[in-house]
Amino acid sequence: MTTTPTHPREATVVEAAPKQLFIAGKWRDATGERTFAVEDPATGATLCQVADASPDDALAALAAAHDAQADWAQHPPRERGEILRRAYEILIERREDLALLMTLEMGKPLPEARGEITYAAEFFRWFAEEGVRIGGDYAVAPNGSGRFLVTHQPVGPALLITPWNFPMAMGTRKIGPAIAAGCTSVIKPAQQTPLSMLALADILREAGLPDGVLNVVTSANAGGVMEPMIRDPRARKLSFTGSTAIGRKLIEQSAQQVLKVSLELGGNAPFLVFDDADLDAAVEGAMQAKMRNIGEACTAANRFYVHADVAQAFSDKLAERMSSLTIGRGVSDDIQVGPLIDGKQLDKVTDLVSDAVAQGAQVVTGGGKHGGDGYFYTPTVLTDVPAGARMGHEEIFGPVAPITTFTDEREAIAHANNTEYGLVSYLFTQNLQRGLRVTEALDTGMVGLNQGIVSNPAAPFGGVKASGLGREGGKVGIDEFLETKYVSIGGL
């Protein structure tokens, strides 16, 4: 049965988290004092009520960002960086309480939540350093008659939309470069996990961020509050992390104002294991790529392609690891698998597994809902998964590892690329030449070669095809919030 432990500080951290809208540096109620409930996915119980913004509230937030833009763009880059640095230090200092808050609203086990707070903080430290390195260029015209001056300026007020699966890190990955570049912003966190973002906004306020530079609107009606802002000429940038279906709609809406758009969308990550792979390392990588965040990640390994000669050994080892994981409410350190985010996601995972089994897939371990309260699904390994199974084409977003075999390199690459998505791939081989060949042949924006985690604030994160546009993190992450201006100087 699922354990439902409690943490002595649960009530304290929930009570301490802001629950209002953050607009122009002030906490305020939503129009009509409307609220929506935030749920603990491990129990189904309501944690608290949070302000439910109206379209008018959203436009007020955009107005605040617009009004603050000119002054913020002129703010010294070093001072912008120092605000981010102070926020980084506060995040690290308060990691325990922030991690507990995240576990309560999202479900991931406390050790993983601590890891996310550290990861989230690193985006602030990284972009605190990048903000002072925004450069330019000066050159003599080819014919010698003039000079070229190239500068980079903030694009303007940015609209930021974050998902529920990494409620703090997806925020800092967008807010960090926006602040460093000199852009104001309005951010809308996911309905399921607003508390982490509201806590982050309060930390930035405490770190000295001027009023109006960051505004937070929480709402149970994402489309209703976002579309008016997207279609408003005061907005100049949109950054979204979420599903490809929603991303396509946002591109259409953004076309009216020709917004600068960056999108981190869905994934269908292949995980390739060749016959010469170190199987213990491959299984460890599989556990990281599959079970990080309970499998609820766009980077999660979604399709396992294993060479026929090692498939039995790999599946046995993986099933042994998966079946040994401790399931329960994630507020104690011994829990390794928490609940899925809500009943809708639990039903989706259940349906995908049922579909695969009905088509001939074999259940090695798991294969069903886990008993007790909340939205728990047992870690699952499937073999002989047919090509027509839905989980081969849809994101599972849960703790399920479907395994299919292959016999040669070309076949493995064809399987891996047979998807509209192109976010990340993983491959395990001890042959350097093969590793480089396959890496170059994979149609993804990122590749994990002999490792199961690719995310790093200092590296460019993003995909190709239906997995998105642009990159976040790394040296190029700040470019998404900058425009290039060319000045032609004559008369020389």
Image (cartoon, helix red, strand yellow):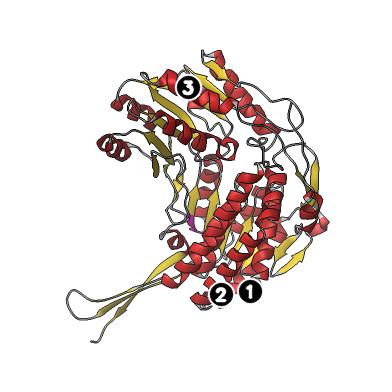
Q: Which residues are magenta?
A: 257-261
What separation in Å lies between label 3 and label 2 (alpha carbons)?
54 Å
Q: Position of residue 119 (x, y in %)?
A: 55, 53
Q: Between residues 52 and 181, which one lies in front from this camera angle? A: 181
Q: Quadrant of the C terminus?
A: bottom left
User: Looking at the picture, how far across and down is residue 228, in whole percent?
Assistant: 63, 56
3 and 1 marks in contact (CB < 8 Å): no
| Residue found at x 22% / y 76% | 141
Of circles 3 and 2, which is in front? 3
The location of residue 397, given as percent across then percent down, is 57, 34
> Which one is nearer the viewer's eye here, 168 or 253?
168
The residue located at (29%, 27%) in the rendering is 410
* Helix, strand or loop under label 1: loop
Q: Is residue 192 magenta?
A: no
Q: Earlier in the sequence, mark 3 or mark 2?
A: 2
Q: Amino acid at mark 1?
A: Pro
Residue 315 image label: 3
**Residue for badge 1:** 210
Q: According to the image, label 2 marks what residue? A: 72
Q: Quadrant of residue 32?
A: bottom right
Vertical relation: 423 (above or below) 478:
above
Residue 289 visible somewhere in the drawing: yes
